Image (tube, rainbow, N blue to C red):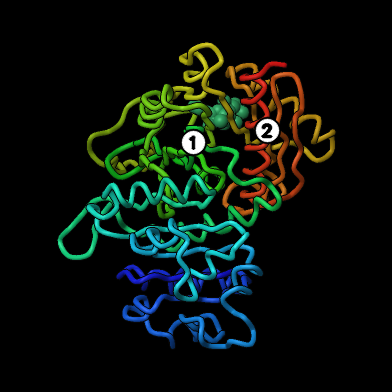
Amino acid sequence: MVLGVSGGIAAYKASELLRLLTESGHDVTVVPTQAALQFVGQATWEALSGKPVAHDVWSNVPSVQHVRLGQQADLVVVAPTTADLMAKLAHGRADDLLTATLLTATCPVVLAPAMHTEMWQHPATVANVATLRERGVRVLDPASGRLTGVDTGPGRLPEAAALFGVCQAILAAGSRSGRDLVGKRILISGGGTREPLDPVRYLGNRSSGRQAWALAATAVARGADVTLVAANVDLPDPAGVNVHRVSSSHELDEQMTAELNNADVVVMAAAVADFEPTNVADQKIKKTDDGSSPSLQLQRTPDVLSNLGSLRTGAAPLLVGFAAETVAADDDPRGRLIELAQGKARRKGADFIVGNSVDAGHGFESSDNAVVIVTPDAVVAEVPLASKEAISHELWDVVITALSKRSDPN
Ligand code: CTP
C-alpha cells in the first residue's frame, strides 16, 4: 500500500493510521508531500513504516520510484488530502512523488480530505471532488466537528480507525468492480439497544456494532451514500458516513422510520431488544432491608424491521434483516438456520435475511462469521467463515442483483 500524506495539521493522525496498517500486516510505503513534512517529519514516517521515505522524484532514481510505487500498489490512500492536492489531481499534475504516484496508480485510490469548511465548500473544491469521483477516485466526505483554531464544521479528517476500516473494506472487495453502488442510498442500523430500567441501569445485549460498521465501510467503498443509525457502539464514526447515535429500541425505531423514505436499501443489523421494563423507575432502584429481590415486569418493544416492512411504499426500499440464531449441532444445523431465517423473512416482510449461527464462538463480538442469505423462499448465497467485510461484500452483491432485477425485470 501507499500512504500519501499532504500538508495539513491532520497529518499527525496519519501516523496512527500507518500504525494500524502495518500492525495488521500491510506493507506500507509512506509518501508525504514537502508541506506534510512541515507537520510530521521524515523520521516519524521511516520509523513507523520501517522503510525509507521520499517526497521528490530525485531520490532513488534507478528504481524509477515515481512510476513503480503507483503501478505496484494494491491501494493508495491519501490522508489528509488538502484542497491543493485535489486541484492538482483533477488536472493530472505530477510535480512530486505523491502526485506522480497518483497519476500512475491503477489500483483503488482513496482520498480523505481535511481542510477548513470554507475550502471544502468552495466551488473550485466541489468541482474538483466531482471530477475525481467521476473518474473512480473514492473521495470520502470529511467528518464534522472541531477544526484547527476555533472553527467547527465539515472538514475534519475521520479518525484513524475509521480510515483503516475503509482500507480494509476496499481490499476485501478483491476483484469486484468497486463502484457499483454509486447513487444508491443505504440506511443501516447497528449495535445493540439499551432499555432503561432506572436512571443508572438498562437491559442491553452484547452486539459490538462491527457488522454494521463493516457494512457501512464496504458500501462507502463501493460508492454508496450511507446513513448509519448506531445504538451504543463504542467505535469511531466510519469515514464518509452520516451517523446518528441512538440508545433505546424506541429511539432506533423513530430514527429508522424518519430515514426510511430517503433510502433505496435498508439493512437492519442492530440487535434490538425484544423486551423493555414496563416501568422505568425515576430513582435508582435500592436494595431493601428485608433482603427481598425485585421482580422485573417486561413488555414488548417495537419490532423495527416489521414496522419498516409495513411502512414502506410497495417494495421500496429493499429491506434486509439479520438473524442470529442458536442452532444445535446435532440436527442439520444448516437446514435449521435456513428454516429460521426464512421464517423471519416471511414474518417481518423482509426481502432478505442474513442468517448466522451464534454458537461455536462466532457472531457477537467476533470479527469472523459464517452466514446464509435467504429470501422468504430461496437461499441466495452462503458464505463460509469469513470476515465481516467479506460478508458485507457478498450482501451488496445480492442487493445489486435484486435492485437491477427490479429496474429491469427481464
Ligand atoms: N428486529 C427489529 N426489532 C426488534 C427485534 C428484531 O427490528 N424488536 C430485527 C433485527 O434487527 C434483525 C431481525 O429483526 O434484523 C431479526 O432479529 P432477531 O432478534 O433474530 O429476531 P426476533 O424477532 O427477535 O426473533 P427471536 O424470537 O428469534 O428473538
Q: Which mark is residue 398?
A: 2
Q: Looking at the rendering, in which quadrant would you find the N terminus?
A: bottom right
Residue at 48% in and 23% down: 303
N-terminal-most mark, 1 or 2: 1
Asked whether residue 175 appears in the rendered view, the answer is yes
Q: Position of residue 338 (x, y in %)?
A: 75, 29
Q: Tell me which amino acid carries mark 1.
A: Ile
Secondary structure under badge 1? strand
- Circle 1 residues within 10 Å: few <14, some 14–19, many ≥20: many
| Residue 246 location (% of width, % of height) | 36, 38
Identify which residue is drawn at 51% across, 24% down.
305
Q: Amino acid at mark 2?
A: Val
* Residue beneath disc 1: 188
Q: Say which quarter of the image contains residue 36.
A: bottom left
Residue closer to the observer: 216 or 363: 216
Viewer-closest of 37 and 377: 37
Callout in the foreground (1, 2) = 2
x, y percentage for residue 325? 66, 35
Q: Name the one closer to the observer, 348 or 277.
A: 348
Specify few, some or many for label 2: CA neighbours under 10 Å numbering under 14, 14-19, or 20 or more. some
Quadrant in the picture for residue 103:
bottom right
- Judged from the image, the quadrant occupied by ligand 1 is top right
Tell me the element at label 2.
helix
Q: CA distance from mark 1 to mark 2?
A: 16 Å
**Residue 24 vertical placement versus 371 (above, below):** below
Name which residue lies at 46% across and 39% down. Answer: 226
State whether residue 272 appears in this view: no
Q: Quadrant of residue 348?
A: top right
Relative to 332, 23 lies left or right: left
